[in-house]
Every structure is written in C-alpha cells, then in structure tokens.
Image (spheres, rainbow, N blue to C red):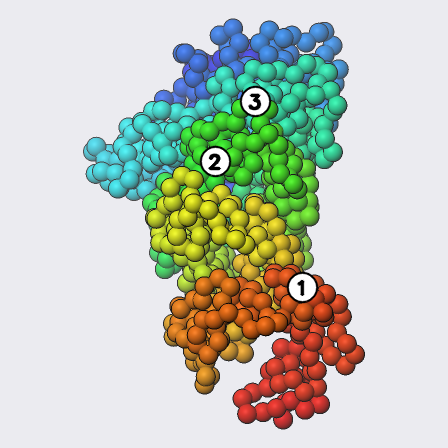
Amino acid sequence: MTDPDMHRLVEPNDVVHAPPDLGRFARLRLVAALGVVSLVAACGSRPILGPRDGSVSDDVRSMDADVTDGSLTCGAGEMSCGGACVNPDTDPANCGACGRGCATGEVCNLGRCSGMCSAGLETCNGGCVDLRSDSANCGACGNRCTGGATCSAGMCACGAGQTLCGDGCVNLASDPNNCGGCGTQCTGGQVCSASTCATSCAMGLTNCGGACVSTDGDDNHCGACGNRCGGGTSCAAGSCVCLAGQTRCGGTCVDTQRSANHCGTCGNACTAMQVCSSGMCTTGGCATGLTDCGGACVDVQSDSSNCGSCGVRCTGGQACSVGTCVCSPGQRLCGASCVDVSSDTMNCGACGVACSAGQVCSAGACSGTCATGLTSCAGRCVDLTSDASNCGRCGNSCGGGARCVASRCQCGVGQALCGGTCVAVYSDPRNCGMCGTVCPAGQVCNLGRCAAACGAGQINCGGACVYTAVDPSNCGGCGIACAAGAFCFGGRCQCAGGQTLCAGVCVNTASDPANCGACGTACPAGQACSAGTCATMCPAGTTNCAGSCVNPLSDGRNCGGCGVTCTGGTSCQAGMCRCAAGQTLCMGVCTNTQTDPRNCGACGTACSTGQACSAGMCVAMCPAGTMNCSGACVNTLTDPANCGACGNRCAAGQACVAGMCTGCPPGFMSCGGRCVNTQFDAMNCGACGRACAAGQTCFNGMCATCPGGLTSCGGMCTSTQFDPRNCGMCGNACAAGQTCTMGVCSSCPVGFTSCAGRCVNLQFDAANCGACGMVCPAGQMCFVGRCGGCPGGLTLCAGRCTNTQFDPLNCGSCGTRCPAGRFCLTGMCR
C-alpha cells in the first residue's frame, strides 16, 4: 500500500483511510470489552485527533510527543525538512539528514540507504519500519493510529493512564468531558479534579481549561497550561527535559554516545563507513557486546529502541530485557499495555477484570475504599509516598529518571537533578561533580572530578569513568545495560538472591502469581502464590496482596499493608519502613550522618566545598585509614559502596571484606552490604531486617533484654568494660589507637595492635591477619600472621579455630550456643 503524502505534515482536517482487511473495529470491540487497552476504530475514515484532556485542541500533527519548530509541530524522532516533518530513520528522501535521498532500488534503513531492511523490519514507502510499534504503519503499511493512540504489538492503543472514549484517548482523572468515566461531563463551571467534578482543583493541581493537572509533570501542560513537551522530552519539575544520558539536538532528544548523526556532540555526523561508539566515530566497528544499528552501537539485549534486533521498538510501557520486550517487575502485559493489576480498575487482580462504577482497585481486588496507607487516584489505590505517577498527591508524576521517595521526587544515590534530569555527577562529563561542570575536550569525569584518564579498574565510557564489573548501565562493557530489578556483578547482569530471571524480568517464584514455583507457571484466578505453590488461601502470618502471599511485617513492597512500598534505602522492619542500624532518615533517604557531606553529623548540615565528612564532622582532610570519596571519608576496606576504591559498589547480598566484594565469613550474613551476626544484631535479629523493639537487644537470634554483665547500647548487648565504642558507658568511644580495658580507654599491651578500637593479636586474629583489616577467606584461620586451614580436630567458626566438642558457643556445629547454665560435652549441650 502506498501513501504519497506519508512524510508531509498531517493537518487537522485530513482524513486517513485504513485498509478494510484489518478488521480494526472488531478488534476494538474485543479489547475494549476486556477493559485492557483502547484501540482506535477506523472503519472507513476518521479525522486525525490528538491526546485529549478537555483543554487542548484536537489538532495533532504527530503520533508521539511533539516538538515545535516555529509554527511546525513534529513528533519524537522527527525533524523539520523543507517545512515538513520527516523521520530521518525511514524517509528515503531525507535518510539520516535533510535532502539525503536514497537511490532507486534502495530503502532508508535506520537512517542509512541500504539494499534491504534489517531483520524484523518491513518496507513501507521506501522506509524500513517496525509494524509492531510504528504509529504511522501499525500492523500494516499506511495504517495510522489516530485519536492520540500509539502502536503497541501491532495494535493502536491508548497509553498508560488513558482510556478510549468515543474516538479519542482521554485521561479520566482530568478530562472535564469524561470525568471519572466516559461521557461524564462537568457542567456549571466545574472542573475535573482527580476523576471528580468539583468547583475548584485540589491542592497542587492547576486548572487548564477545566482539566486539573499537575504542571510539574504533565507533558501537555508543562510548567504552564498549554506548554506541550515534544521531541522525546518529558515533563519534570515543570520543565521539558530529555531522558538521562540524552541531549537535545535540533529539538529532538538523542544519545550522543551512539547517534551516528550526533556523535559525541550535536551535529557531528559519522561517515557512511563509520559507527558511533561511546561518542566517537570509528571505523573499527562496534565493541564486543554491541551491534551496529544504522551506525549506532547499541546493546540489542537491553535497548528498547532496538530490542533483539535493530529497529524493533518496545511499546506499551515495555522495556527491553535479554532481547525481549517485557513489562517492569510488578506489572503484567494486558492486551498491548503494561498494567499494575494490584491497582488498575480495568484489570484488577488479573487482565480483563474490571471494577464496577464507583469501585476502586486495592491490592488486586475491587473494593468500595482503598486499604490503609493507600489513596484513590482515578480509581487506582496507590501509595503516595512511593508511586512515581502520583508522588505526594494524585497526578504528580516524577520525570527525568527521578523516583518517588517519602512523597518527594528524588534522584538516586550518587545522582543530582541537573536541568530536570537525574545524572550521576560522579561520572557524567557534562555535569562532573556538580550540575553544569563540563569537562574539557579530551578529559574524563572520574569520581566527580575532571581528569586526564580514568583510575585503576575503571573504563572510559564516553568520558564517564565507570566500573564495568558492577555498573548496571555498563555491565561488562560500555552501553551494556542490565534489566530492571537486576544488578551487575563480575561484569554480568544477575538477579538478586532469592530471585529468578523469568522472560527477562527478575521475580520471586516463591510469591509471584505469574511465575509460581517456576517461570511461566501462573496461578488460576482466585488463587495466590505461597511458597512457590498456588493456593486458595494464604497461610497464617501472610497476606494476599494481588495474588502474592507476603509477610507485611517484612515485605518491602507491602510493608504494614498491601501496596505500601519502602523507599529511600529503608527496609520493612516489624511492618514499618526503617533505616538500617547506623543510618538516619534525612529527607526520606537513609544516610550515614557520620560520612555524608550533605548531612554531616545531622540532617541538612552540609560541608563546605573542599571539605569532607568524617565522624560526623566537616574536615579539610580525611584521617588516616580512610579515603575521600565524593566528600565522604570512608574505609575502602569495609565500605560496600566504595569497596577497594571509590565508587566500587558491592552487589546485593555481598559485603566488603578487606577491600573486596565477597560473601560473609561463617556465622555472618550480608544485610545491606554489611556482614552482621544475626544472633546478636538488634536491627537484624535472627534474619535481615528483623528489628528488635525499643529497649530490647538481640541475643541468640531472639529479641530480649541483655544478660547479666552486659549493657544495651544502640540495641546491642555489649560489655562497657571492653567495648572501645562504649567504654565505661554507652557512646563513650576511645580515640584512634586506644582500646577499652576495665571501662577505661588505654593503649594496647605488648604483642597486641589496635584495629578499629580493639586490641588484637595480628598473629592469630582471622579478621586482622598480619595487618588490620586483612580478613582470611571463608574456611581459613590466621596462624602466625598468615591465613590457612585449622589444625586437626578443630573447626573454623566465625574466623577462629575451635573444638566443637567442648565449645559452648559452637557446640556440635558452628553457631550452636548452649543455654545459660549448661556446658558443651562431646558436641552436645548438657
């Protein structure tokens, strides 16, 4: 099918004819009945309509977000050529650049003239397109999506948060003509606020033509009513910004690290024989693990615009994982869109299960009201403290890569909000150390400072110094990204402990109703997944949250109640989101006020430029034994965020021992990157995250009061007679090099050395073998300052050799303690 006007601007009164053999109206009826997605009916003809919220004109000139060039409005990925909007990736008359035409018999393939299309693409009017995602050729050449719909899985569908009403996609939360439901019109000067007609907008929302929207995050009203984001930008903090890692070139967001037309900087085009790799045009081809897609070196395993093969784009809210388009963890693909069945009123608990009028979807069940801790936003019961689409209030969407933490849109650890986008200031050469600090040509950004070269163990990825062994965005090589929920360790993307990779997504098969017990094993409707088995009822102590049997006392995604998510580094402890021991909640984020230069000693106390935070005080120089890592004085021998070197973060489930990310020694468990003894740690008593109540301590893995002779200091039973951190009394720490003897700080006796405030014998201490911080590997002991095995008849327990036949602390096996008043004989407590 041909369309000679395919590349010109679509005017408001244009009519687009759909091929009659597609049966789109029938598909519309079927999918709309399921309440899954909204298809745009096109039997015969229909004028082109745009996304509607009741306040914007139906005049739309592209299928995606728009970018304005004078009076011309072009779509994302398009550019203005001779007064018309064209897609340089597919237009044979403007292939890769305006006026660059392909010869007879050639097609425009990913911005380059070629004899044939790449695998997975089809030829439409001389251009190579993906019929599964191209809104101008959806399902078939020339089949254009209208009414604000986009193409997903070869079907025209409304985007997330929108519903098909009549012939257009609308937002029921703000459209005054379809407020809360199709056809429900607000009259008498009323506005539509949070799906309800009202006399005025709720707090934090702005009246834009009768639609109550958040101008902080609304792409159609960004910063002010009618200010529409385009060119691939999204609205964040009231400004139209590109995604993290992208730059705006000629009104369109591009990744200058791989764009063949904007390689390294806007306008720097690579030749036909070159590729763009890490921001440089090269003739050597793409690096290992990357694929040449129209001159751009991309990872087809994780690139959502080239998923599995070049030009195959993920749509409907999906992302690319292991070369397959998948929904994010916690979401399911219903029809052509990813939805959260725990809160979606049209797919409540399962795809196609729609709630009745006036009901809300709470924890995967239709109900009259939301559960405790959740708020109804357009019928969806969400946690305003953690929901990125409703952060702090309904409709307030976080953008630019920010997350919702404690009801505030915030960037992740090590990131800063620069121009509305979260960037890693410790490695971003365009924002090195702080927003706007651009490293000179030829230099790189190394730990927040411009330098001539990267440090040991780091790789230069487009001017950013990264550790490819642990960086999830550059795992094993530049540009190789891990999927959502996965982490990078040893240069390989892996799922966290207790999770399994199912169809490219890390899930817990013990509780995931879509993968219960094994990948692909879905529980029937009405059943929930409990311990890897589908059951009609959750066992005692657990709660059914959208088909998953979880413990609300310890589940971070359902803490204290279904849908209540712990954020900011907190974990669920006794049904409450709390920080780990030694950390403080500052502006919704857990931090160590002993080392955080932005919260040094107390929340909000920031160190001056050039200073670092050490022991809760701002200093000009870090003390001996610590290193200045982005303003924090840390011990790289033990810090899981800076293990062995600044920025080298240990993977989930690992701890930093002697400057190396590794598992914990026998008797210890990794909790939040620290090796802890769950037998005595009050914040992790018996298991990670199981915190004792105020006034209690942890003894033998159970919360209780301290036994005789010991004092509770910070939730830990300790002897104030010998503890250098609590010498004589809780909180009285001995100076560096001193130890605590009979409640008095003093120097170590002959033959002993002070290591972290303890007098130890370097000849036999497995945690300080030969030198402070030199930890022997699991299964070895320290003998004459060297790590090795235990002598015959002895067993290594918690770093020391002992006889489990007579040791009351390790009776019969390591960690088996005899109760008070009993002794160990032949491996049994008597």
Under tag 3, what secondary structure?
loop
Query: Which badge, 3 or 2, is on the more N-terminal residue?
Result: 2
What residue is rendered at 74% in x and 33% in y? 288
Residue 765, by quadrant, is: bottom right
Residue occupying the point 42% across, 60% down? 578
Kindly identify the amino acid type of the residue bearing the numbered disc 2: Gly
Q: Nearer the viewer, mark 1 or mark 2?
A: 1
Mark 3 to mark 1: distance in Å? 46 Å
User: What residue type is disc 3 on?
Assistant: Ala
**Distance in Å between CA atoms under marks 3 and 2:** 17 Å
Question: Which residue is at the front of the view, 154 or 642?
Answer: 642
Secondary structure beneath dot 1 equals loop
Whole-percent x, y for residue 717 in the image: 47, 76
Classify residue 295 by image quadrant.
top right
Instruction: Give the spatial CA distance, label 1 vs label 2.
Output: 38 Å
Q: Name the quadrant containing residue 393.
A: top left
In this picture, is 603 found above or below 762?
above
Nearest the eye: 154 or 758: 758
**Which numbered disc flags the more N-terminal residue, 1 or 2?**
2
Q: Amino acid at mark 1?
A: Gly
